[in-house]
Structures are given as C-alpha cells and as structure tokens.
Image (cartoon, rainbow, N blue to C red):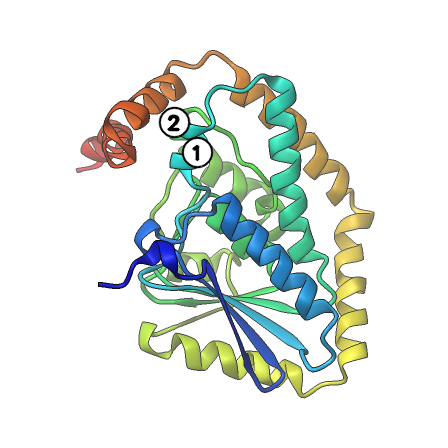
Amino acid sequence: MTNEAAEPVLLVEDLGAVRRLTMNRPRALNALNAELMDSLMDALDDAASDGNVSVLVLRGAGRAFSAGYDLNEDAAGGVMDSVGWHAELEHSTAQMLRILDHPKPVIASVQGYCLAGGTDLMLACDLAVAADDAFFGYVDVRFGSGVVSMFLPWVVGVRTAKEMLFTGEDRISAAEALRIGLVNRVVPKEQLDEATMALASEIAKNEPFVVQTTKRALNRVWDVAGFRAAMAANTELDAIIETANLEARAEFRRITEEQGLKAAIAWRDAQYREDQA
C-alpha cells in the first residue's frame, strides 16, 4: 500500500500552457495543513515567474477537493490567546489572497467535499468548475468557530452568504452552487478534468498580458468597494470568536483530543442531522 505521508502533498504537472496543481492528501480529504499551504504558495510563486505558464488549475486528489483547514493540526496547536489567533488568521487570509492576486488566472476543479476553508480556497480562485457530486458549505458555526477568509458575500451576495453562514449548512449541492453563483459550471464527475482543461486551454489561447491585466482590473472592482478592509475586519472579529469562552468549541476540541476528529465530527453532526431526519 502506498504511504501517503511519503508522497508530496502537492503534485505539479504542465499540460501545454496550463499548470495543474493537485492537492495530494486524499486520506485527509485534502485538509489544509501548514505543509500543504506552504507547498501551494511555493508553486504559485514558481508559476508566476514561468513565462510558459498561462493558466493554473487547482484540484484535489481522491474523493474531495478539500474538507477545509486541518482540525487535527488545529487541536494539536493548543489554546491560543487573541494575539496568537489574530496572527494565525491574518496569515491564513494572506495566503488565500495570494491566490486571488496571482498574476495568472487560477481555475478550481472541484469534486466531492469542498467545505469551510476548502470553500475559501475555491473562492480565492478566479473560476470554478464543479463535478455534479460536489458539496459546499461552511460548518464552522456549528462548533463555535468563524469563517477564516470572508470571500463569500463578495461572490454570492450578502443575503445568500448570511443564510449559508448562519445555518452552517454543509450540504449545498453542485446544482445549487451553480444557481447562486458559487461556481461557474457543473459537469458530470467523469468529465470534470476534461471540462476544466478545456476552459483553461481556451483562456490560454489568448494574449497573456491582456488576460493578466484584465484580471487585475476585475480585482480592482472589489478593492474599490472595500474588499481588503472587509477582509481585515473579518480577521479582527474572527479572533474575537476564536478566543470567546464557547461551550461548543471547547467540547469539540476536547472530543478531538481524546477520541479523534471523527468522533468530534459525529458529535457535532448529531445535534443537527438527527433533527433533519
């Protein structure tokens, strides 16, 4: 059996003018830990300076795009004060913004679970193609945490974002994601790679300077409307959430440390999904 720990956490391949980055933690549902995010940042830097790369595709190995930030790593880090949390959240948001600010278009290719920090990652990309088996959502509120990077209202609008974040719903289907503008396209699962590459190749045919400058102009629309200030405000408010004395988060962390993440998630979900049965 292949030892996942011995494999690179990020796979890089060039397909013509398209560079495809594959998050390679399938057993962890491509949870975003420090090693994976650092590898992704390095790969983005390499692609930015490579004149042979016009478009990037980001995808996940296995049955998920990404289930979000690695909660095992979070639990192992222990309890932090407000200064520690602010620094951690600021760092995570800065990494997401490096994807948004990358000079070249980045397309998310999404299958299976795309949750919480995984949804942030998808939203930081310029475009998203989803398989019909994809599920999206932010479950953070259900265990006493806040959203790390507040991209959501800028993409789907404030009312839709409020419903998603207040409920903590994590079963938003690909069809619903398309309807609310969370993704650009939905295709059958078996066609995901082909459809994503077709879109990337179509963009790559165009003059790179014009595409890259147009991306900068489009990002300026958000900047002029106060996007960066809103992201900074979310970091400050999320630090308050993460350092508040909340029973739900304390219990979730206790179960994670004593029984494992799977047991903690089962405890969390039992409070909601049994009521929906």
Task: Please give the name of the residue rendered at 48% of the width and 36% of the height, measured from the top-left corner.
Answer: 165
Query: How many C-alpha atoms fall within 10 Å of the one at disc 1: few (<14), some, or many (≥20)?
Result: many
What residue is disc 2 on? 143
Q: Nearer the viewer, residue 94 or 124?
A: 94
Where residue 216 appears, as percent x and y from the top left, is: 79, 63
Q: Label for residue 6? A: none
Query: How many C-alpha atoms fall within 10 Å of the one at disc 2: few (<14), some, or many (≥20)?
Result: many
Q: Nearer the viewer, residue 240 or 174?
A: 240
The amino acid beneath tag 1 is Asp
What secondary structure is found at the residue carrying circle 1? helix
Q: Is residue 28 above or below residue 234?
A: below
Q: Is residue 104 shown to the viewer in this render?
A: no
Residue 23 placement: quadrant: bottom left
The amino acid beneath tag 2 is Phe
Q: Quadrant of the N terminus?
A: bottom left
- Decide: marks 1, 2 in contact (CB < 8 A)? yes
Where residue 253 appears, as percent x and y from the top left, is: 36, 23
What secondary structure is found at the residue carrying circle 2? helix
Q: Is residue 2 left or right of residue 187?
A: left
Q: Nearer the viewer, residue 267 or 13?
A: 13
Q: Label for residue 140? A: 1
Residue 205 placement: quadrant: bottom right
